[in-house]
Every structure is written in C-alpha cells, then in structure tokens.
Image (spheres, helix red, strand yellow):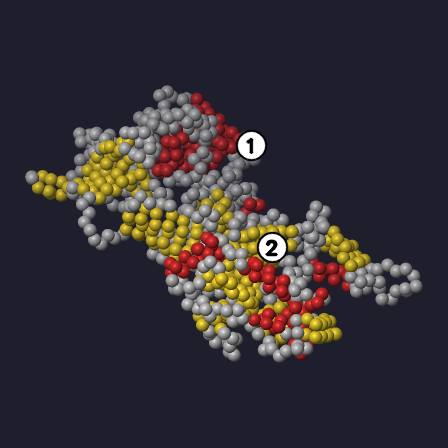
Amino acid sequence: MIRKIYLYDKMPEKLEENGTPIIDWKDLPEITRSLNNSFSFYGNYLLNGNNVKKIKKEKYLKAYTENGTYQYFRIKSVKKNLSGISITALHIGYEANRNFIPEANVANGNGKQIMNALKSNLVLDQPFLYESDVASYHQFTAKQVNPIDAIIGSNNGNQNLASVCDAELDMDNYTLTLKERIGEDNGFRIDFGKNLASIEETVDDSAVVNRLFLVGGVPEDTDYNVEQTPVTFGYLSVSGITEENVQIAKRENSECKTVDELKKWGQTLFDNDRIHEPKVTHEVDMVVLENTLEYQNTYQKIASLRLGDTAYISLKNLDIQVQERMIEYTWYPTLSKYKSIVLGNDLEMYTSSIETQVNSVKKKLETRSDELINAVNNATQWITGNKGGYVLLDPKDAPRRILIMDKPNAADAKKVWQWNVDGLGYSSTGIDGRYGLAMTRDGAIVADRITTGILSSILFQGNVIKSIGDGSYYQSVMSNGKFMIEQYKKTTSVDYSNQNWEQTVHGAEIGGFVGTYGGGKANGSAILNFPGYIFSINQSNNSGGSVPVFQVPEDSTTDKPKYNLFGSGMFKGDIKIKGSLEVDSLKVNGRVDVKELYVNGTKIDTNGGGNTGGGDNGWNGQYPPEVTTDRDKRYWQIWAMAIGAGFSKQAAAALLGNAQGESDANPTADEGGGRPGFGYGVWQWTDSSGASSGRVYMINLMTRAGVTDNPDTITAQFKLLMWHAPNGQWIATSSYPYSWSQFTTLTDINTATQAFVANFERPLDGHPERSTWAQEWYDKFVNLEIPSGGGGYIAPISSPITVTSEMGWRTSPITGAQEFHNAIDLVNGNPTTPILASGDGQVVQAGSNYYDWYGNYTVIKHADGLYTGYAHQSRIDVSVGQNVKKGQQIGLMGATGPVTGPHLHFQFMDEYWPSSNAHFKNPRDYINF
C-alpha cells in the first residue's frame, strides 16, 4: 500500500483532516528520527510536478510514521536542484521552541509537575500539551531559555530536563511527553554473527569497567574533631569476571554513608548505566537487507522494532551479549518501511543546542543514498504501479539474479519473474518453480503451451557429455513420423563457442519409437533399438539417477538375443503367462522371491532355494573382555554378526577362516591398488570381466543390494555377503551340494569351510589351510559370551553420519525465531534409514501424541535413569511397554512434524517430561559422533 503525503497552507483545526496529496516525488521521501534529538522530513519533488508551485517555506506536510500515526512537519527550506526541489521540514513539536521561559523553578517535583511548571511559565499561548510519566522526584531550573532547549537542548549551559530525569522526549504532533523511556523491552534477540554487508558494527570497549573499588562519604555519627576516613568497598564485580578479562576502576559517591548503601549504588552502575558493556553501534541498511533473498528472515525481525525498543545482541568477537536500543531511524513514509536504523547502547546523545541539531540533521539528509538502492525502490513502483510489488536482489553482493514478486517475502510469493545471466522466466507457484515460461540467453523460448503456429519438425538437443572420450553428444529428433535418439561425434578441436558437429556415418541412430509397416501399409508401432547399444527400462532411485529393471544388453543380436532382469523383489505377487512358454536356458542374476517357478514342468529353485539374504541382526558394537587386539576385533565383528544372523558356530568359523585367507578380515584390503580385475575387501570382491576395480564392483553390488552403510566397513560388507551369496554368487557344486541356507546350518567346520571355498570363492586351487584357520577361530570364540549391549550408548543410525544441527540456541529454520534446540539432528544419506535403539531399555512413548513439533516420536527409558528420544520418524516399529535391546531397529527416519527435510532429532534427557532446558543433555557427551 502506497501512503500519501499531504500539503497544507496552515495547520488544520482537526489533525485528521487530509490536505492536498503530494505524489510526484523524484525520490522516495524520508523521515529521520533520533532519541532526544532530531525528528525531520526530507523529500525531493519533481520540477514539473503538479503541485510544485504550492510547495513553499513555512507550509505544513503530514506523513505516515513508523509507530502507525500521521505526524505534521513544518517546511523549513525549499531549494531547487537540477531535477527537482529538495524539501527539509521539522516536526511541529519543535514549534514549541518559538516560545520563551523567563524562569521556572521546581524544588522537588515529578516529571508531570516539572512539565506543568514549564508550560505555566511560557510567554506565549500555544496549543501544546506538556505531559510526563516520570514518577521520580527531581529539582530543576529553566531560566531565559526556549522550552525544547530546556528539555533536550543546552538549557543555557545547565543540565537539561531529560538528563536530570534520565528520561526521553516523545513528540506526537502537539503533545510533548517526557517519558521514562520510549519503546518497549520485549526480549527481542537477534544474531548479527553473520557477515552482513548491510550491517555496520562499531564496538568501543576502551571504557569498559567490570570491577569497582567504591568510595563513599563519612558516616553520620562521625567525630569531626579528628581526621576521618570515608567508607569504602573493594571489590564489586559483575558475574563471569576472571583475572584475564578484569577491568578495575574507582567510583565515588559521598552521599553513601554505609557499605550497604555504597554497594547498592555501585550495582546501579552495572544494572542501569551498563558500564561493564562496551559502547556498541549497529547501523543497518534496511533496503539492502530487504532486497536480498538470504536475509529475508533477518529483515522481517528487525523491521518489527520501533524507536526506543530494546534488542539483545550477541557480539561474536567478544563472546558476550549486550543490550541495545533503536536510537535512530530513517523511514520511507510512502512505503511504510525503514530505509535504515541505528541500534546502540550509548544513549548520551543530547545536543548542545537545537540549532546545531537541526543543521546536523539537514546535512545528513541531503547526503543522498546509493543510487542503486533508490533505483531498486523506484523500480518496484514502476513495475507494479500503486498496487504494490517487490524486487529482490539475490544475493546482496554482485547479485546473480533479480526476483520480481507479488509478495515481500520470497517464501510467500507465488507470482515470480526471475532474471539471471542465463535468461528470464516466470513461475506461478513460487521462486522454486516450476517455470513454465522462459526465454534463454541463446534465444530459445520455453513454454508450457504454444497456442498458434505449425511446427514442421522438433529438435531436442542434449548437452555435451564430457565424460565420453570421443566427444560424443546425443540429441532427440522428431520428424518424418518417427521419434529417434541419435549420436553425434565432434570432429574438430574442443571449442564450445564455435562447434563444428557432423553426424557419424556408422551407428548414428541409437534407437527410437517408430511406425511398423507390412504388406505395403502401416500396421502398428514399435520401440526400435540398433545393435551395439543398450535398451533399458529404468526406475528412479530417488537420488537423481535410475537403475535398470529390464535391459537388452549391447551384445544382444537378432540371432542371439539376450535379456536381463534386475532388482530386488521384482517378482513379488503373481506372474501369469498364458499360452506356451519355451525356455532354452534361464539365468537368474537378481533376487527371485517366488515360492515356485516351473519351466517345462521342471521346478527352478536357485541352487536349492533357502535364505535369500539381504539382512542380519547387526553387531552391537561391544566386545568380550578377552577380545583386545584390533585384529581379533575385526574377526569378532564377523563372528557376532553371523551368530546374530542364525549361523551355526561352525559356519560362522568357516567365514572367519576364509576371511583370513582372503584379506585377514581387512575391509579395505586392496589386492590391485585400485586396478581393474583385482579383488577388494574382506572377501575380495572381484569383477570377473576385468572392467572395474574390486572396490567399484563391490559398491555397485551394494547399490543393487540396497546396502547404504559405509562400504569400507565390515558391517557393510557382511550385509553384502548376505545378499550376494544367495543372489547369484553361491553355486552349489557336486563336491559340496549345499545351498546357501544349508551352508549356514552346517556343524562340521571342515565341510563348512571348504563348501564356502568351492561354492562362493570358486578358486582354481583348493585351500585346505582355511579349515585349520577356521578351527583356530572357533576354539578362540566358541565359549565367549556375546555382550548383551551394555557398556554405553551407540549411534542411533548407521554410518556415515552427519550432524546437521547441534544442540543449543539457534535460529529456527521453521519460524525464524530464536529457539533452544534440545537435541542434535542426524542424517546419513538415506532418508528412510533404520533407527536403532541407542541402548537397552523400555519404550515409554511411541506415537505422535507427545508434542506437535516432534511428529512420530519414540522415547526409551534406560537403566541409568536417562531417556533417549527419537523424533520425526516415518514409521514406528515398537510400542509402549516393550523392552528393546541396544542396536534393535525401532523405526525409520522420516519428516513427520514441522521439518525442512528427513532427519533424526536425537535427544538425551534426565526426565521423561523435561520441565526445563536444563534437563536435556547433549548426545555428544555419551556418543562420539
């Protein structure tokens, strides 16, 4: 809403009357006000404006101010410049200074009584009201002085009234009010720790005093015939003072006759005068702050302050918090917005004379602001007219884009034009798009709908794929009744500004969608693929890529066609094939999760069926006291996970004997130093085709298996083993005709060890020594108890863990307000990763009925009296009253409740319903993240 400024020949009898609207401003008019200082108006009016001849000195203006009221100003100067006339005006409160006080004395009165005395001793009658809410009593004299000068000016060299009463003068048109303070203290807090170019911070700590040696007067019952010593006290300090940061000074007050009086007075120097805080000033350029995307929340908070309001500011460099007040602002009355504000804690800003004050303000106002900032504000009006609109620069320094929006806050805007070096686009659903209309810097136009015209052909051209060594790139072409994907090769040197592309002679067309013909006529349609290229049906993997479901490999030919099926669980449910099914051979490379599959009446069962793998009961992170060396700990992890997955102890020992032969159970053992065709990890995964290194081959397998743990850990590789063996790697031999599930239950160590060698490893030569090693590990571990989960807490999600928000005070990512974050937020790259109990205990909360901001929330009570909390889960797998073990899955990560994305909000508490922040404990004190 654009608010008008009104012009009057003389002050109206009723202040709510509107005068002549003045709208032809060259620049945005400004109002500047300071505590106990200036209150003035400045504007630059167009030379050809409709009312230029009416604007004269001594006329009056009315403008809208920051406290929601219209205030009157008397024009003091009108000066012509190259493009307009500059207008300087003072608030009508200063008109009271046209009067004179011969003499006014108050021996002992409160603020109201002193203000009445000033009014009753005026020479002239004026329509001003003299008010005050100062309750304390003071002695005051004003002699041969103007009234405003007596209140906040030089008072003929004597202390002015505002200084005597430690008060502030508020002007509301004809009402002059001496207030104990202007503004409020609502506990407003803001963190200026960011490097904001729009906020200039000045800190002067040279006069800081935080420890006092106090000197008072001589006690009342003193014998003055002998020399007397005044009362003293050493030392009075503020809290938190150490020998490293102490600043000591002496202060004297002869009115204090006792130590208690002296200490009470000294404490006021800390509480009221804040002598222990540095002198701080924050000058905030509100226009720069508003017209940036990244600091919208900061702008909205500061814009809620009013003159005199208190703000609590953290000084990062000094690691302290100080109180500041808004002591000055410059305001755009037509836009109802601040141009700039000043926050400070040095409130001794009284002028020696009103004339000096006015000249200072006038000089400051006539120093115009940055032309770019004015242009941004004017552009807002030009683009949107008088209906309101908003232009944002993002970021503030060297903007990469300009946003033109229908709302002041980017988060709320729906209709958005975005302009950057790559082009111009429009979105009707907010700044994140979708941008249905766009024009690129290359001259291309993108639109959801083209309503006119005929398109004879369409060319969809992709970008250069730089990872391909021959410089190939791909494009899609729709023409002549078919849609084709074509490959091109670059035949000149790499010069992206002047590319000379030509179609390759061989293999140019990769595949596409075409019509089919037969008998001299069109008879259908088909997906066409050319030899030497892969045809694949893929499914998104939710990370920007995709994985194949069905694939015709590049070596498939018409004579020898090949087809690959991928995925986990893709055959769940019914598969019905009507008609005859003729299968020469069937190779299952992925997991087949069906009860029965028959081909030509013969049951097909992966090497006897059984355990399909893919999971384990985990390892709880604990070792028996007998397991002390790093080497033994590696083998114990495998042993504990195998036992937890249902292995017999002999089969578990077989895994250990084979792990010793392959890598000495080292999850990062690299046989070929990263070269293709060599093994990697605990069981030396090897790409038999020789195309990739063992580690790459292993990670690709983990992607197919859905293993999201850190690949270079025993945990991840054991999970892969449990998936890989029953899904193609394990092939039963005639010497050891056991399926994978049968192997896990074998009770003869030699048989189990050699079955693993023959059926999983399948080496050229046998390894009888591995049976000996398996027996040795069996003898070492067979009688050791697997710890039940004691010995501390474990991380509630698997590695790699990232802490995205620490515990403590922060700016809320939801509301923008300061809040105490009573937990740490954890992610590991999997938005639905399993959540594990951090320790043994009993579930006391499981659901979404705790607090609105936790979503699905689980709380576990532990034997040591602590509670752990797990918030924002997408699924809860436990119920209230259930006993759980450390490492047991209790749910899945999610984004329920107010969040910005999936994560785990993880807490430690010493109360189930914490009564204060003190009862939340930092999880880092119990778990090393």
Which is nearer the eye, 606 or 676?
676
Query: Residue type at mark 2?
Result: Thr
Position in image of residue 68 (x %, y %): 51, 68
Q: Which amino acid does label 1 sit on?
A: Thr
Q: In which quarter of the image is the N terminus?
A: bottom left
**Horizontal side, residue 237 vs residue 373: left or right:** right
* Image location of residue 248, percent across then percent down: 74, 51
| Residue in front for this viewpoint, 910 or 214 | 214
Please tell me how crowded label 2 is: few (under 14), some (14-19), or many (20+) other residues with Cα within 10 Å: many
Lateral position of residue 279 relative to residue 482, left or right: right
Between 531 and 746, the one nearer to me in the picture: 531
Q: In this view, does 877 lie above or below 497?
A: below
How many labels, in total? 2
Q: Which residue was labeled with disc 2?
A: 281
- Residue at image point 64% right, 54% down: 279
Residue placed furthest toward the left: 519
Q: Give whichever of 358, 444 is nearer the camera.
A: 358
- Residue at the spot 65% in from the left edge and 67% down from the top edge: 152
Badge 2 or badge 1: first in the primary sequence: 2
Question: Could one spot residue 214 in this view of the protein?
Answer: yes
Q: Name the residue under label 1.
A: 628
Where disc 2 sits, the SS reads strand
The structure residue drawn at horizontal position 40% and vertical position 30%, both measured from the top left corner, is: 695
Q: Is mark 1 on a helix, strand or loop?
A: loop
Q: In which quarter of the image is residue 410?
A: bottom left
